[in-house]
């Protein structure tokens, strides 16, 4: 927490290479130290915590070293602190917190109600497919994190059209990643859970609801990040916070508090999330950017969906072969789905100059 300012400075200077390298190094070292603590000592979980502490102290301290080298204008002087700047930062931080915290509170509320209604075992089953989607969500969050300082720089330069283009292109790329990964969970999620946790965890309807239900919010995480960069996320964050729980309350009126099912809990999570973060927030972002909603939907959502249709078709054929016990055919269709999708993405999503550079190394030409 104390090194948060160093992280902010590095990302503010767009040194994502250093920021990500330190983050990755911290993760790798902490894993190594945890494994060593488990196998070479008798400290058990406490040893893992010590390993995490050592890794964190080392790499978070390194952030200040790089800040000192990269951010030449930065000077640590307490006399420069003032109440006006503190209030501005505090206000911005509260607005940012309000934009991120509703999904966390909603999920924890549903988890508590699941335990009280069905029992701890049901929560364990519910948490496993949620954990799979959370991994995809983590990647999307890391991807969109850079949009806030980038948008702030563009706004400072007064380039509104560049912000519009950034919003459309990054949302398109977000959907290009979310569509195949969540689609894979939608079609093969129960198989993954079967081999990961066991047959009792492989509830296909639950996985399908959580996978398809998080597509719109996850693919449009760019909306709130762009609004943060413009410092226009205050009112919509408050509105989202209230609306999420109003919709959740309305859902409870229909489902009741007793005789819950796991699919009920999943629907109570994904429906409010889709309405708020999948529809309302993107529309608000388009309005703030003076961007046509029709243009946004066509370029950011419809195009990636058209690109991914062959993937869904081949993956569905693969699943059909898998269900019939034809594993070789299932793997062939699965591999074809990956190859076809990568080819489509290469020609339609990779920037022209980068595409030409890649093709030139193999003595090929870009159409």
Image (tube, grey):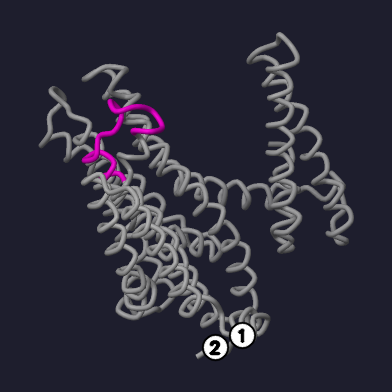
Q: Is residue 45 magenta?
A: no
Q: Residue at x 40, y 64 (%)?
A: 175
Magenta part of the chain: 194-210
The residue at the far top in this view is 42
Q: Residue at x 14, y 22 (%)?
A: 258
Q: Is residue 107 visible?
A: yes
> Secondary structure of the magenta portion, mostly?
helix
Measured along the vertical axis of the image, is residue 140 above or below residue 104?
below
Question: Circle 2 sits on which residue?
Answer: 366
Q: Residue 356: which disc? A: 1
194 or 95, which lies in front? 194
What kind of element bears circle 1?
Answer: helix
Q: Residue 160: which disc? A: none
Quarter of the rendering containing residue 275? bottom left
Q: Quadrant of the N terminus?
A: top right
Q: Residue at x 28, y 45 (%)?
A: 270
The residue at the far left in this view is 254
Q: Is residue 239 visible?
A: no
Question: From the viewer's perspective, is 351 left or right of 219?
Answer: right
Crowd class of label 1 (few under 14; some 14 to 19; many from 20; radius 10 Å): some
């Amino acid at each position: 927490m104390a090194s948060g300012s160093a992280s902010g400075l590095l990302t503010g200077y767009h040194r994502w290479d250093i920021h990500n390298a330190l983050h990755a190094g911290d993760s790798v070292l902490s894993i190594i130290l945890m494994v060593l603590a488990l196998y070479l000592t008798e400290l058990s979980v406490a040893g893992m915590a010590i390993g995490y502490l050592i890794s964190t102290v080392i790499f978070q301290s390194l952030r200040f070293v790089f800040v000192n080298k990269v951010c030449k204008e930065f000077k640590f002087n307490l006399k420069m602190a003032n109440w006006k700047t503190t209030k501005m930062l505090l206000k911005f931080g509260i607005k940012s917190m309000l934009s991120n915290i509703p999904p966390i509170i909603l999920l924890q509320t549903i988890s508590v109600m699941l335990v009280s209604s069905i029992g701890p075992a049901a929560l364990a089953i519910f948490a496993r497919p949620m954990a799979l989607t959370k991994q995809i969500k983590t990647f999307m969050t890391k991807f969109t994190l850079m949009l806030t300082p980038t948008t702030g720089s563009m706004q400072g330069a007064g380039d509104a059209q560049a912000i519009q283009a950034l919003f459309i292109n990054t949302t398109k790329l977000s959907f290009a990643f979310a569509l195949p990964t969540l689609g894979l969970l939608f079609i093969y999620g129960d198989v993954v859970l079967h081999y990961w946790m066991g047959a009792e965890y492989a509830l296909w309807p639950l996985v399908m609801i959580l996978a398809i239900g998080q597509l719109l919010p996850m693919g449009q995480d760019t909306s709130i990040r762009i609004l943060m960069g413009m410092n226009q996320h205050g009112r919509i964050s408050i509105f989202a916070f209230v609306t999420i729980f109003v919709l959740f309350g309305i859902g409870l009126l229909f489902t009741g508090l007793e005789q819950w099912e796991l699919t009920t809990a999943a629907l109570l999570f994904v429906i409010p999330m889709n309405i708020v973060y999948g529809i309302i927030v993107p529309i608000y972002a388009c309005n703030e950017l003076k961007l046509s909603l029709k243009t946004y939907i066509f370029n950011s959502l419809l195009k990636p969906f058209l690109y991914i249709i062959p993937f869904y078709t081949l993956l569905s054929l693969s699943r059909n072969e898998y269900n019939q016990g034809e594993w070789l055919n299932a793997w062939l269709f699965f591999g074809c789905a990956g190859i076809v999708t990568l080819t489509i993405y290469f020609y339609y999503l990779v920037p022209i100059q980068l595409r030409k550079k890649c093709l030139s190394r193999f003595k090929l030409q870009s159409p």
